[in-house]
Amino acid sequence: MKKELHIFFTALLFYTRIPCPATIDHHPDYLNKASRYFPVIGWIVGSIAYIVFCFSTFLFSNEIAVVLSMIAGILVTGAFHEDGFADVCDGFGGGWTKEKILLIMKDSAIGAFGAIGVVLLFLLKFQSLIQLIRINQNSNFGIWNFNIGILLLFITAHSLSRLAAVSIVFTHEYSREDATSKSKPIAQNYTWKEVLGAFFFGLIPLLVLSCFQWQLFLAVIPVFVTRYFLARYFQKWIGGYTGDCLGATQQVCEVVFYLSVIALWKFI
């Protein structure tokens, strides 16, 4: 149990800005095992985003509350995944060879592709959340009330998208030949415990959500179809993935989940 707590706190330290015990560091062995708890980080980030949204609605409109919840999620993770998405937009938008793409993605400066990509991503995420909130407010499904619905949607979106991202580690090779990326240790090796743990924690919130409306479980299909094509695209151009690719996958799959739920709701 003590070792598992250490692994969990390693994941929390690596993926968020939440303070952890002083004994926790970025030890490669624990970082490898921490991938099993990546979706759990989604539980935490989604819950914090929901709490900020919930309290904000007492003072502001739903639109402002959604923006504040998005800001909370960014602050908790230190824009870890958003930064990866921007780097991927810049790298694959401006590079035409593996070497050029990787070089651009290592550059800390954001370019036109990255800036435009992040703006459009945030707009789509904002509009999707607003529409989902309106759907929940108009829902008449017994236990499926406003608070439960929004909480589950936040947690499921963050956990499922993180599962989609980390699953690429299990099926593809790390692209960089050096150790310049801080994500390198995670990609060195993994066992069945990491695979089983990631899928268990990643799918549990979706299963709970599906208990209220079983059709919503179908949202897993477009999420993993998106994951498949993203991984295939990364493989084609750079021969694998980088930490930025995982961050971009998480962000894109989160939005795809929101859009999938909106589309599925038309048939419920």
Image (spheres, rainbow, N blue to C red):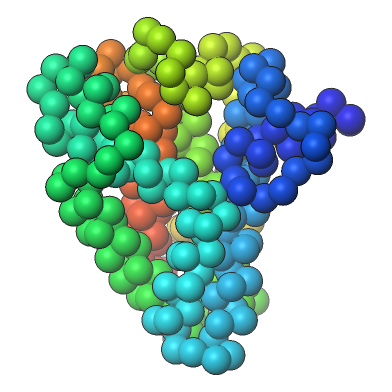
Residue 82 spot, x, y in % from top left: 38, 48
Residue 89 spot, x, y in % from top left: 22, 40
The vertical placement of 95 against 122, above or below, is above
Name which quarter of the figure residue 242 lies in: top left
The vertical placement of 178 against 111, above or below, is above
Name which quarter of the figure residue 151 lies in: bottom right
The quarter of the rendered structure image containing the N terminus is top right
The vertical placement of 159 against 57, above or below, is above
Given residues 206 and 142, the one toward you in this image is 206
| Residue farthest to the top, as pictured | 177
> Quick check: can you spot residue 252?
yes
> Quick check: can you spot residue 194?
no
Q: Which residue sits at x=50%, y=31%? A: 166
The quarter of the rendered structure image containing the C terminus is bottom left
Residue 184 spot, x, y in % from top left: 49, 19
Q: Is residue 204 left or right of residue 163?
A: right
Q: Is residue 137 left or right of residue 38?
A: left
Q: Which residue sits at x=74%, y=37%? A: 9
Given residues 211 and 113, the one toward you in this image is 113
| Residue farthest to the bottom, as pictured | 59
| Residue farthest to the right, as pictured | 2
The vertical placement of 57 against 12, above or below, is below
Residue 146 spot, x, y in % from top left: 56, 80
